[in-house]
Image (cartoon, helix red, strand yellow):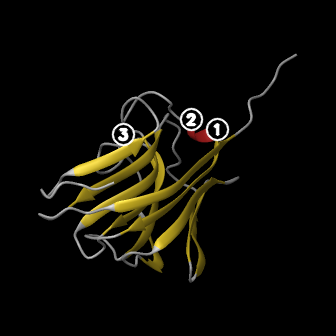
Amino acid sequence: MSTGATSGNNVRLHRGSSATAGSLVVPSDLVVLCTTIRLVNVGTAQIFRFGLGQDISAANFGTAGAWLEFDSASSANWRYATRQGSTGTPTSSSMAVVNNTWYDMCIVRSTNGWAFFVANASGGNFLGELTTNLPTTACQAGYLLQTGAASAVSVDIDLYSQWTAPLSRTA
């Protein structure tokens, strides 16, 4: 995926018919959401997000969600976030984002909240777990890439995997 070369231009990829509708995921039904990506313009001002968002087209992923992000204006490191009712703040990790490097990323619903993992060829990293501002609003699963400069930015996506809880059966 690549943006245009105008600051604020974004591109997104989501499962549903729009950034906020179709194929919505109820956060309590999601078990694991994983992807493999490579950012190829890390030196350029940009925002990249992967995960659940109430509005994938919004730079902040909307009013609810759980996601991993790189926001070059805020940190040179991977960050992770949960949000519900517009309340929630991304948490910075100690893992730096390196240009042109493949990353395996996973968001896992845990007993107490959401756990976030990022790994590359140098090794894996448990970024952390968030137990507050947990999303309950139905969300879209997907990606957002936005440029913050007058030049295009790109991300290569190699894998997307989503595991949901099994449906319950009644007799």
Q: Position of residue 115 (x, y in %)?
A: 60, 60
User: Could you tell me which quadrant the N terminus lies in?
Assistant: bottom left
Is residue 91 at all visible to an observer of this figure? no
Q: Amino acid at mark 2?
A: Val
Does 86 sit above or below residue 97?
above
The residue depicted at 54 percent of the width and 36 percent of the height is 25
Circle 2: element type: loop
Circle 1: element type: helix
Extreme residue toward the bottom, this view: 122
Circle 3: element type: loop
Residue bearing mark 2: 26
Q: Residues within 10 Å of mark 1 (few under 14, many from 20)?
A: some
Q: Are marks 1 and 2 in contact (CB under 8 Å)?
A: yes
What label sits on residue 29 in the rendered view?
Answer: 1
Does 163 sit above or below residue 123?
above
Q: Are marks 1 and 3 in contact (CB under 8 Å)?
A: no
What label sits on residue 87 in the rendered view?
Answer: none
